[in-house]
Image (spheres, grey):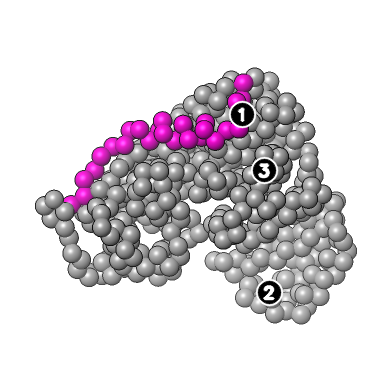
Amino acid sequence: MGRLFGTDGVRGVANADLTAEMALGLSVAAAHVLAEAGTFEGHRPVAVVGRDPRASGEFLEAAVVAGLASAGVDVLTVGVLPTPAVAHLTGVLGADLGVMLSASHNAMPDNGIKFFARGGHKLADELEDRIESVYEEHRRGEPWERPTGSGVGRVRAYDEGFDRYVAHLIAVLPNRLDGLKIVLDEAHGAAARVSPEAFARAGAQVVTIGAEPDGLNINDGCGSTHLEKLTAAVVEHGADLGIAHDGDADRCLAVDHLGEEIDGDQILSVLALAMRERGVLRSDTVVATVMSNLGFKLAMEREGIQLVRTAVGDRYVLEEMKEHGYALGGEQSGHVIILDHATTGDGTLTGLLLAARVAQTKRPLRELAGIMERLPQVLVNVPDVDRTRVGDSAELADAVADAERELGETGRVLLRPSGTEPLVRVMVEAADIDQARAVAGRLADVVKSALG
């Protein structure tokens, strides 16, 4: 069996790949593994459980709660809240474990389970591996000690979670948003109540779209993966900016007053300058992935801010930030981590801070984001090749070197073998889109001939 845990928990089609039995079993296994690791020592264990509005989240939540309680863990259910809210509440409530049920930006039929350790941090890889191993042992019939009587877990709805999380968001803001009109696209997801409430309490005039989740419409033609409706609404309402979240609201993209997209790299640029100005951008450093636009790197260099790059995935950004104490990091997709105030990407917090910068400077978002110029970026997937030989082919190395000489300082080449499929991704950036396409096409041909 392949590894159940991906870079962001366990995901699959709900009730097909991800069943109630699996959700229950993984929860029991997580409780046992954390008990083995000493997490529960000396006290009665507590878990926080939340979900996004997907219909399947209702039965999966019931299964997770049953699994945890049957393993002797008391459970606080917080209902429909964003992923970063569950992480935050896990930390501030001193819980031993957090569980979020969501498939983020995926379509409605999917769902997922993400575990948080004490403090609201993602579980280490070795703990996920151990949970998977124990889950398989139990599935094969390995007996486990079941508590009885007063030893079983108790379940309570923690209704204060919504207000406590919104209060946290407001407390982080360096200034209010009075005078701004902002359109929020909630993707019919987990932030449909939280985000409008937070922006309104901060003083903004709020227009909401995609804020009527019915369990079936999450991410359906709206949110951060479909910006067309947000763009139209910003222009229609004459708003200062628009903010879009995904299904579990751990990411944020924006549009300016003309409806032009502001991506994660540009958001990071704006926040980096704001944080440096306030003296909270530790080591004057931002962390991003290798997929961040070259224009972002050039802008940070021009402003005297160091850029540290990691592998693709917000967990790798977070690992780098925690290891070196950096305060800001994120991805082009809109996962932005402000480590002083969140242990994971937080779309609502990111949007609030972006809007706060607009309000504080009294400059349009379009002008603030203009600090960086997005260079044309072309991505070509080359299928049916031996991805393991990317680093060993002399022919490919020579082709990449030729491409880099042609592109010079205003271009970049990146070859990324897929982690799961027999394909190689060719990414080329250049000052000119036609040049980027031409170079990417030539490199794709070499990848095919050299590795096919």
Q: Which mark is residue 390?
A: 2
Q: Is residue 170 left or right of residue 45?
A: right
Q: Residue at x 50, y 59 (%)?
A: 7
Of badges 1 and 3, the one in the foreground is: 3
Q: 10 Å neighbourhood of mark 2: few (<14), some, or many (≥20)? A: some
Q: 10 Å neighbourhood of mark 3: few (<14), some, or many (≥20)? A: few
Q: Residue at x 33, y 33 (%)?
A: 159
Q: Position of residue 116 (x, y in %)?
A: 41, 53
Disc 2 to disc 3: CB gap under 8 Å: no
**Magenta region:** 152-178
94 w.r.t. 445: above or below: above
Q: Position of residue 27 (x, y in %)?
A: 31, 56
Q: 10 Å neighbourhood of mark 1: few (<14), some, or many (≥20)? A: some
Tell me how far mark 2 sits from mark 3, CA to CA. 42 Å
Secondary structure under the numbered disc 1 in the rendered image? loop
Of badges 2 and 1, the one in the foreground is: 1
Label 2 is placed on what type of residue? Val
Label 3 is placed on what type of residue? Gly
Q: Position of residue 305 (x, y in %)?
A: 74, 51
